[in-house]
Amino acid sequence: MLSRVANSLYWMSRYVERAENTARLVDVNLQLMLDASKLDDKAIAGYWAPILQSSGDDEFFDKLYPKVTGRNVTEFLVFQADNSNSILSSITQARENARTVRDQITAELWEELNRLYLFLNSPKARSMWRQSPFEFFQEIRSSSLLLQGLTDATVVRNEGWSFAQAGRYIERADKTSRLLDVRHASLAPGYTTTQTDALGWSAVLRSCSAWDGYKALHGGQVEPKLVAEYLLLSEDFPRSVRFCVQQLNTSLRRISGVAEGRFSNDAERLCGRLHAELQFSTAEEILARGLHDYIDELQGKLNAIGEALFQTYILQHFALQQEDEIRQQEEQQQQ
Amino acid sequence: MVATSPSSSAAKTEAGHGIFKPYETKAYFDEMLASDGSIRPHYQRFLEHFSDLKPEEFEAKRHAVDMAFLRQGITFNVYGDAQGTERVFPFDLMPRIIPSAEWEHLEKGLIQRITALNMFLHDIYHEQHILKDGTIPAHYVLSAKHFRREFVNFEVPKNIYIHICGTDIIRDAKGQYLVLEDNGRCPSGVSYVLENRRALKRTYSDNFEAMGVRSVEHYPTELHKLLEYVAPAGVSEPNVVLLTPGAYNSAYFEHTYLARQMGIEIVEGRDLLVRDQRVYMRTTKGLRQVHVIYRRIDDDFLDPTVFRKDSALGVPGLVGAYRAGNVSLANSIGTGVADDKVIYYFVPKMIKYYLGEDPIIPNVPTYLANEEADRKYIVEHINELVVKAANEAGGYGMLMGPHSTAAECDEFRKRVLAEPRNYIAQPVVSLSRHPTYCDSQFGGRHIDLRPFILYGEKPVIIPGGLTRVALRAGSLVVNSSQGGGSKDSWVLHGDK
């Protein structure tokens, strides 16, 4: 498989996953605000500020908008073309990557992604977003899930598929941790949980589609520690960080053919190590360290894996180019 | 032949039914309507079915096809548009129909032409008999912009220069087929032939098989066979790739489409590198050798160490690998000389010279500005002629005399006199017209035809080709950049 193609497939599915998670994040906050008792400017800003912080783009937001309002934040996260992480930008980049590997993906997959792109760029999308945001975010989520289903149902399980899987799961691990991070303040030692917090924690669960799974395991009582444990360490919930890292690990090993427990490059080494850490960690340990710090470090580790993957499979083959040019010019001098 | 003014002839037509209503053919040759207004025999079967459609059904079908094209991303990029706008190539649901006997004539003519062109290219890059004999004045070939003297005496694989050719064919007021130009470098448009057919099959799914249309589906298979055929000697399972300029090229959809249909990799210049005169592609598993490149970039950009130094699209060392016989290119380097509009003038002579035959499909009458008598004629009659630069394409560098101002004519007169080698002139041919749906009704619109010729072990032409149509009433320009659209072209198994 061409390195450029592998890179494009990886980013195509990463961007789709990113758009879906942004939709989840915004949607859940909108729902949460329906339950709020009083909503003055300060309360509204209090709802949205953590969302912006978790996206890591809060400073950029402040440059573009005068005030933290629901309208401004959702506009920023959904349609703002200058925000490279907005849903519109993510889907545009996913499609751009898909376009350059049009021959590698199935027609069904391409058509759905293209449809989503055309929808987001149509006037219909903005009017739907204004009139019925729930319907709008449902549309994004459905489309993303449809894309994943199509990938599973139509794409040949070759190397390209493994790169796409790697992109999907590394992004999802990162985003699940960010969704959790939104509520980290109420898990600080010595903090007493309030009624509003309970609502906030169930919103986090719903935003990860984890509500049903959590309930089946722990009943209806939403306990922050258990939520954090479920989203970070669950072995079988498909959006937990541990599950995603395990899938990422499997994908990396499918690409190289190296067995579990061994490694042939840095991406495998770092990913295998992180997976082991997650396997043998407890929620108590994590909370004792501080959830926010833990998540910060986790994101750093995921970034390192992504970087190593790029170095191993994509970049090294391109780095050769310059060397070759020099070599060729040298050869010409001899003639 | 001089400029034809569309004087009204008395072609009053019989009352139509359903959505198609016949119109006056005027002085033009109409593909469907005879001059007495009757329907030509090869359109009757289609029209019987078609006439049953109600206007709203037809509109629904049109909408469905447009949406399908947009959804599938069958679009071309509009250059110079900051929004990166992609447009759907307008498509007309009424097919252009060619009866079997006419197609056989065209097919023979096209094969004759490509055979002669390949013999010509071999000749001018070797012994140059045709130049030494004076059949073609040597200076015309040697001064051609795309003549690559570096490749004189170079043996191209299987001695084929033009593997894939798109020849533009038009019909004049009498209905005679004429060759307008040959595209022997990187002709595009074949993906539309295949997608247009798929669209019409869906649109007329109830009775498509009853129409007796010859299939075009085998094009990618034939192309793949051809590419494998020209692989370097001794390579049993050649790695064939398609080299694209990239996702921002207006034909990018076509590149991915063909690569996917053939099951080959589509690569950009930066995916390839040359070592020890062999071409490799960079894969996640290291380097893998490439044996055949179906290149969709021009000679000039292929290799910055040989041609344009500023080319970022090419592969340094590619030409060296090609010379060493380690990689084959389709089309070969240096075929552009046959696209030169001055050389076009000599194609009928080539056919006579190499094959001893008369051309089956004639050229459009052409005046060479470099010849004194012709130049005098061009300068005096410039407002009746189409003047073309010898090496431009896509409707650029062209003057349509009858539609131009005196100042524009003067400007071209000056250019012709300053650089006579680079200009030719032709009478305005009133291209044939075809019923086309525009502004909620059918009207006659001018069309041309670009068949795609594959020249491998034996020549193969898929029946039909791309019919381009000028959607603006009265316009003779069919290019997509200038308001052109396309039609599906049906070649029938029989003559009705």
Image (cartoon, rainbow, N blue to C red):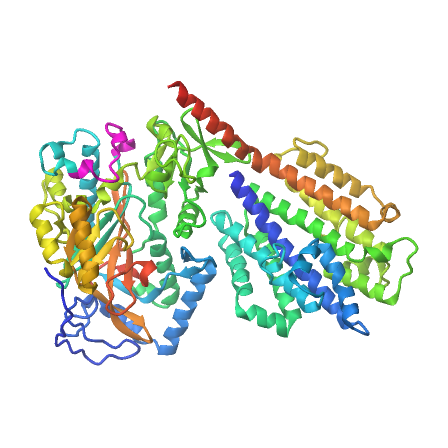
Residue B492 lies left or right of residue A321; in this view the side is: left
Residue B71's place in the image compared with B366, above or below, is below
Between A46 and A4, which is closer to the camera in this rendering? A46
Report the quarter where the C terminus of chain B lies: bottom left
Residue B410 vs residue A88, the one in the foreground: B410
Q: Quadrant of residue A59?
A: bottom right
Looking at the image, residue A143 sits to the left or right of residue B289; the answer is right
In percent of width and height, residue A23 lies at 66, 61
Q: Nearer the viewer, residue B90 or B84?
A: B84
Q: Quadrant of the N terminus of chain B?
A: bottom left
Residue B373 seen by the camera: yes
Q: Quadrant of residue A51?
A: bottom right
The residue shown at (70%, 34%) is: A269
Q: Is residue B347 above or below residue B488?
A: above
Q: Residue at x 46, y 29 (%)?
A: A325
Image location of residue B61, percent across then percent down: 39, 70
The span shown in magenta is B140-159
**Residue occupying the far top of the picture:** A334
| Figure quadrant of residue A275 | top right
Position in image of residue A31 (x %, y %): 73, 69
